[in-house]
Structures are given as structure tokens and as C-alpha cells.
Amino acid sequence: MLQSFHVRDLALIEHAELALAPGLNVLSGETGGGKSLLVRALELLRGEKAQAGLVRHQAPELRVDGEFVLQAGERAAAVAALVREVAGVEIGEEPLVLTRIVDAEGRSRARIQGRPAPLHALRALGEWLLEIHGQGDARSLMRPEIQAEMLDSFGRCAPARAAFAEGLARARALAAELRSVSGAEAERRDRAEFLRFRVQELEQLGLQPGELARLEDEHRVLAHLDRLRELLAASLADLQDGEANAADALGRAARALGDAAQIDGRLRGASESVAEAVERVAEAARAAQSGLGRLDLDPERLGAVEARLAAVREALRRHGPGEAELRAALTAMRAELGRLESPERSAETLATRLREATGEVARLGRALLRGRAKAAPAFAAAIQGELQGLGMAQTRIRVDLDAEVAEAGLLERATAHGPGPVELMVQINPGEPFQKLRDTASGGEMARLVLAIKKCLADQDRVPMLVFDEVDAEIGGRLGLAVGRKLREVARNHQVVIVTHLPQVAAFAQAHFRVAKAVRDGRTLSAVERLQGAAIERELAAMAAGEGADAASLAEARRLVGKARREEA
């Protein structure tokens, strides 16, 4: 349950702190006073989207903190595991603290037990901790897919629906692939032929790592062969072969300096330097001699190198710009060619796989349909039972389903919600025909149907907290006590928060909070106050007769509170 939650700088709310009761909690107050802002705060705590406009004017950010107390059980274990995964902390006996912060630019941050956490972690935890039912639930209830989800929730068919949706997605992907292959067979053959040619071309080229640089170096030598021979010969003459060559001169100098160093030790460094120069000149002469030896080449080699260079550069122009890119292109073309030539992608193979996948979808659809057919009568009966105490005792409910799942056309007509529609059919008045829910109910009837259905689903699900935002908006005071009793029943197994204008509903509250606007220092504020004793009776009287209620209204309010408490006892 939500033990308490704190709201700061959310629209008109500068600061609010609510300590909630375990059972039924009521939020009341004048229209526009800020009641729905507290529901919005819970939506933010549940990880729903936020807008910058929610931040109070001139405040840097809004903040919502919620303290949840977990009861031992499977749900608490799942929440603890999720907190451990996303926040890296263990939940002991202390409350689980969730925080949502939204700055003035609309950027959101989330914290779990004070540690930063991704926003999707709040959404995941919210699915385990609380549900919020707003005024739009009646509209969503009209949609067949929502009716399917409700029936599946009641009948524990959600895993079968998920399996069907996965199978349907796989079959449709195969159908799309088959259409692509069948409709582009000529293009596929042309593409495969083109790729075979290119792959063969590059494989025959056989470019080796670093080959281009080696070819360019060799071509530069071959293109300047005569000039290189002249330069090397001249350098050899100057180094060691000419009459006045460097090797002889340096040798004489080295010997003289060596003898001098024997006399004056300070010349030893100069002697060593010249000796080193002698060796370096000898090395240079050997290198020049080796270079001349390499110039005795095949005269046809230049043409061969130029032809190889041209082939390599053309390949790089198409697939480069470098050798690495060319090799990557070859790998990619081989892979694509393998896919195009794979028997797994042939039209015949895909058609066979599609038939098998469609059969599997039909099998999964029949399993889902069996589960729904088993749950449908019990679901209808449960709704009818809940309507008994809501002034709709004569209303009959029926759930219409397809009788069979045929493979022909299944992929076209099915949805992720099932092989066929689920329709809640309603007979409001005896003797009248059953009609689809969206074609029959008035606003007040729809509100009661929503409440009855939520009660049925709440009995199936032990989600700790349920929030109702004016789901009783179109229900008159005459039925208010019945709605209050129904909410009290829900609150026996769940913590419930409801925004209401009906004193008959509010009378059943275990904790009653009043939200009111006021102007302070030129700023409009919404404040939240927990009511006790006589203040509850005054609020109920105001809800029934307006502000400044008379003694009769107060007496009626006192009577409502007493009646609700006697029934509770």
C-alpha cells in the first residue's frame, strides 16, 4: 500500500503531504480545486509522461515522493527483485521510496530508494503497485480490444493471448518475406548474377594487405631506373671507388686522430667520431652497391606493375577508398549472395514455412478461444452480480466470441488481441434485444458498468492500490450509497483512492481529504487537508448543498456517516 506521498510545486500545489489509510481514501473539493492534480501526481509516480507545464510557475522543478509498504507475498518478491535489478538495493522492512522529478523544461528524473533510476523502472514498478482508472475508462471500454483484455485478465488468458500475438507476428513476417521474394524474383536473379560477377572479380584480383603501397614504391623505382642508376654510381665513386673518395680520406683522418689521442686523451672523442663516420660511409657504400644490384631487372616488369596498379586502383575506386573497405565490401557481397542463393529464401520454402506458421497461429488461436469461451459466462455472471447493488438488477450481460478459428484469411482478419473480436453485449431492459456495449448504455449506466467491471477484475488481481478519478461522475445521489458500498467492498482487499463529488460515496471513507484553492500573497494555491469528526460532516453537507449548508444538510450528512459506519460494522 501507499503509506504516504508528498507533492511539491505541481501546478497549483506548492506543497502537499498525504498519509493514506489502508482502505478507502476520498478526495473531495470544489471543481478546479486541484483534486485531479493529486491523481496526476500518482500518474507521475507510476512513470507516465510529464510536461513542463505541470511545474508550478517560477519553480525550478516539481517533485513527487511515494512511500510504499509491501506485504509479504509473490507480488512483494517480484517488486523486490525488480528494485534489486534496476537500483541495486535490497528492500528490508523499510518502505519502498519512489521519486519523480520534472524540471521546468520538461526533463524527468526518477529515483528508487534515493538512487537514480531509469524512468522505465518506475513504469515497471507501477504495474505491480497501483492502477489508475480515469474518466476516460468508459470510452476505452467501448473498444473490442479493451474488452478482450478485460476478459483475458478475468480468465487468466493473457499468456495465451501473448503467445498468439507472437505467432501472428512471425507468420506475418514470413508472408511479407514471401511477397517480397515472389514479387521481385527477376530482380533477385539479376542482383545475384551481379554479385557473383563482382565477387569473382575481387577474388581473382586477390589483393593482399599492403600490396598497393608496395606496388607504388616499385613503380616509382622502375619509372626512374636510368636516373637512379646514375645517382647510385656517382655516390659510389664519391664514397669509395673514385681516386679522391670519402672512404680513403676518412680512413687517413681516423688513423691520424687515433695516434694523436694516444698522446692527448682529450682527442679520444674526436677520434671515435671519425671512426664511426668511416663505418657509416662503408655502410652507405654497401647500400648503394646493393641498390645498383637490384636495378638489374626484367625490362617487362614496369608494364606488369602498371597493369596491376591499374586493376587495384579501379577496384578501390568502386569499393574503396582503402584496402580495408574493399575487403569489407567483398565480405558483405558474399553474405548477400549467400542469402539470395539460400534455399531457405526460395519462394517454395517460404510458402511451406508460411503454411506451417499459419497452422500454428490457428492452433494458438483455438487455445485462446477455448480459454475465453470458458471464462466468458463467469465474467458475464460476475458483472451482473456486481450490477445487482448498483440499480441495474435487470441488466443482462453476454460475451460474444467467434465459434471457430479458420486458417483461411486468418492472417488478414486477426489482431494481436486474438483471432476474432470480443464483444460485450448488454440488455439493459427486459424484453429488449442485446446490443453492443458501445451502442446502448447512457452515461450513468456506463459509469456503473465500469465500476462493476473494475470490481470484478480487482477481485481477480491483488494489485495493492486502485485509484478512481471521478468514475462516479454521471451517477446521481440516489445511487451514491450503492457505489460507496461497492467501493468499500473493493477496499477490503485493496487500498483505494477516489476523487468524488458524491457525499453518499464519501461517507464510506476511512480517510477523507479536502482539496481547496486559496489566494495567498497574490498567488493561487491548492491545499490538502485531512478531515476529522465534524469537519467530515460539514464537507459532506457542502458536497450535497453547497457552501454554507444549513442544519438540515448537516443532519443529513451526519446520518450518511452513521449509516456507512453501521454497515461497516
Image (cartoon, grey):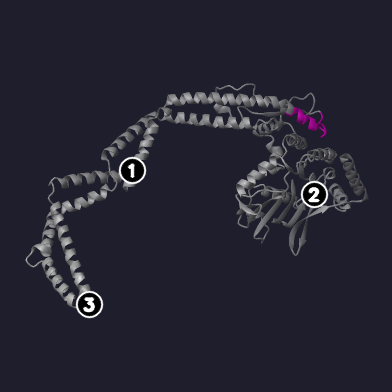
Rendered position, 186 above or below 311: above
Q: Closer to the N terminus: mark 3 or mark 1? A: 3
Q: Residues within 10 Å of mark 1 (few under 14, many from 20)?
A: some
In terms of secondary structure, where does tag 1 sit? helix
Q: Position of residue 91 (x, y in %)?
A: 68, 48
Rendered position, 547 above or below 346: below
In the picture of the structure, the residue carrying the numbered disc 2 is: 28
Q: Residues within 10 Å of mark 3 (few under 14, many from 20)?
A: few
In the picture of the structure, the residue carrying the numbered disc 3 is: 266
Q: Which one is in front in this view, the residue at disc 3 or the one at disc 1?
A: 3
To which quarter of the image does residue 261 belong? Answer: bottom left
Rendered position, 50 above or below 458: below
Asked if the stretch drawn in magenta spans residue 478, the answer is: no
Image side of residue 230 versus residue 81, left or right: left
Q: Which one is in front in this view, the residue at disc 2 or the one at disc 3?
A: 3
Q: Position of residue 30 (x, y in %)?
A: 79, 51
